[in-house]
Image (cartoon, coloured by chain):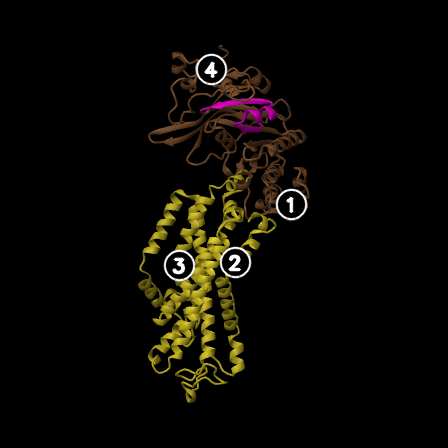
Chain colours: A yellow, B brown
Amino acid sequence: MTGTHANMGPAAIAWRRFRRHRLALASGLVLLGLSVLAAAAPLVGMLLGTAPDAVDLFSRFAPPSAAHPLGTDELGRDVLVRLLYGGRVSLLVGITAALAAAVFGTAVGLLAGYHGGRLDALLMRLTDSVISLPLLPLLIVLAAVDPGKLGLPEGVAESESLSLYRIVVIVALVGWTTVARLVRATALSLRERDFVLAAIAQGAGAARVMLVHILPNLASPIIVATTLSVGNVILLESVLSFLGLGIQPPVPSWGNLLTNAQELIWTVPGLALYPGALIFVTVIAFNFLGDGLQDAMASRPSDG
Amino acid sequence: MTAAAPAPSPDPAEPVLRVAGLDVSFAIDGGSAKAVDGVGFQLTRGRTLALVGESGCGKSLTALAVLGLVPRPGRIGAGSVRYHGRELTSLDDRALRGIRGNAIAMVFQEPMTSLNPVYTVGDQIAEAYRLHFSASAREARAEAVSMLDHVGIADAQNRARAYPHQLSGGMRQRAMIAMALVCRPDVLIADEPTTALDVTIQGQILDLILAMQKENGMAVLFISHDLGVVSEVADDVAVMYAGTIVEQTPAASLFAAPRHPYTRGLIETLPGTTPPGGRLPAIPGVVPDFRRRPKGCRFSDRCSLADGHCRDASPPPAVSGGAVSCWKADAP
């Protein structure tokens, strides 16, 4: 392998390996397509001459037509437009929450793994404690907190996107542990590597060694773990929204679209099927993508 | 940050680095054990001191202790390390960072693992430069390229953009040396710099180190277990055994007239001293574990000359040139 990789940087080698992973490549394209569609939701709404919360009680449960490609729901709202707007919310929540969790988890794991000793013990017991908390009851309690009573300004507390911020914060608060453990374990082994000693012998300080020398070597496990966790977060968002604790209607998300559909599942199965299928496809695509990235970045170029 | 440039020594005979009575100890249950015990030596401008010994005798630990890099849970128990008269063992980490890489630089054994796999060698050398000099990225880059050129890497401009895995072992070690020398240190510690390399490359790297030394007059502490390599580079040799220096002498007299029984044993094990076809002699036994060293002279359990006195009392360590730590030195 050395010959073929002789003139390539680490990123080029990873991309080369990734391209051979067809399922992951296809998943990446599917996710890219979904993201573009979700981003273009207002445009689609404009083309169809409707909005996600435009109620039309005269055309409830309309079958698919040129004006409503996927029909309408119980209030005559366009299903396609609502799905796309829901995708914006679900993908945004999934990606931001996973990123926030990854940043926090990386900071905790890096400090614990590099410094070791008491700081490591303290941070890892904290991680264990968070892992031991029963997730769903905790989320339900956190989701029920009235932000107005926490002293937040009224504008924020009453805003429509509050449920969105809230769910990002909640998921990040409980989701950082996986990355923290992973980063800590890898940092523990990296700090014993010669290049870390060489950097210290060159006069680099602890912060510099952690951020400049160790962190870039952690990129692949962090990227893989974060990609995999986006899928989990989207599932979690669906569960919470389904339970009525996540994104609050009328803002659509794939999770609360399902809630809406549960009473109508026998009469209008499409209303449940579409968001369900989108959640399924997105989560599975993130998992395939994560697997592909793992294979592509599994070994350092030096092993190749 | 710009650390204070190493003050040129007014007196050329004044040692650049003086190590005295250095102990490195590790806490073990119920006490502590000294892995390095009472080591003393001096480095002078333009000269190379080779620190020779078997694996586990404490030579690398001695080198790391000079830079305040003793791995946890070890610590410097006693002794002094003076760089141009400035005590290093009492400096805080911040002050030590100004010394490391800038005044005293180190080259390690394995160039593949000592270079960060995710950066190009040019970036790494430039970064080492910017740690100690305020330079723009462009200036540091130019410095890195010129340093790579200087250590004999052809097409340095392009090679600077190579990742460590794209270079051969010899080129990596050249890059490592460029990184160590980019801040113009006046002490270079080379910890087995050729051990991981092919024999043909070894000679080139040794020549490179000597050429760099001749050019800027730095003092070199050369750590090796290979007496053949040592004979090529060293001006002075300190032989280390079980944490102490047992004999310290100019290289020529060490090979001509070794005085310590351990040194003699080592030299006899070199091919060439034994007639062809003969069996190479070996020193019986192994280096004692640093937690369970014999009482008295540490070499007494492997020494054919040892008597009761040797097993009871430790000879004084060899802390300066011409000294030998043996009760039976020069005995037939």
Residue B330 vs residue B179: left or right?
Answer: left
Numbered tag placed on residue A175 in the rendering: 3
Indicate the chain on which mark 1 is placed: B
Horizontally, residue A300 falls left or right of residue B151, namely left
User: Relative to B34, does residue A22 appear above or below in the rendering?
Assistant: below
Cα–Cα gap, marks 1 and 4: 51 Å
Q: Position of residue B267 (x, y in %)?
A: 53, 20
Q: CA distance from mark 1 to mark 2?
A: 27 Å
**Along the line of sight, the residue nearer the viewer: A100 or A218:** A218
Residue type, mark 4 in image: Cys
**Measured along the vertical axis of the image, is residue B227 above or below residue B72?**
above
Q: Which residues are magenta?
A: B221-242
Q: Residue furthest bottom?
A: A58
| Location of residue A273 in the rendering, given as x and y in whole percent from the top left corner | 39, 76
B76 and B197: which is toward the camera = B197
Query: To which chain does the residue with label 4 belong?
Result: B
Labels 3 and 2: the sequence-earlier one = 2
Q: Which numbered disc, 1 or 3, marks the residue closer to the eye?
A: 1
The residue beneath circle 1 is B159
Same chain for the residues at labels 1 and 3, yes or no? Answer: no
Residue type at tag 2 = Phe
Query: SS class of the residue under badge 1?
Result: helix
Q: Residue at x 44, y 62 (%)?
A: A287
Q: Does the magenta-highlighted stretch encompass residue A67?
A: no
Mark 2 secondary-structure assignment: helix
Q: Are marks 1 and 2 in contact (CB under 8 Å)?
A: no
Which chain's residue wears label 3?
A
Callouts 4 and 2 on one subunit: no
Circle 4 sits on which residue? B326
10 Å crowding of disc 4: few (<14), some (14-19), many (20+): many
Cα distance between the residues tagged 3 and 4:
64 Å
Q: Secondary structure at mark 4?
A: loop
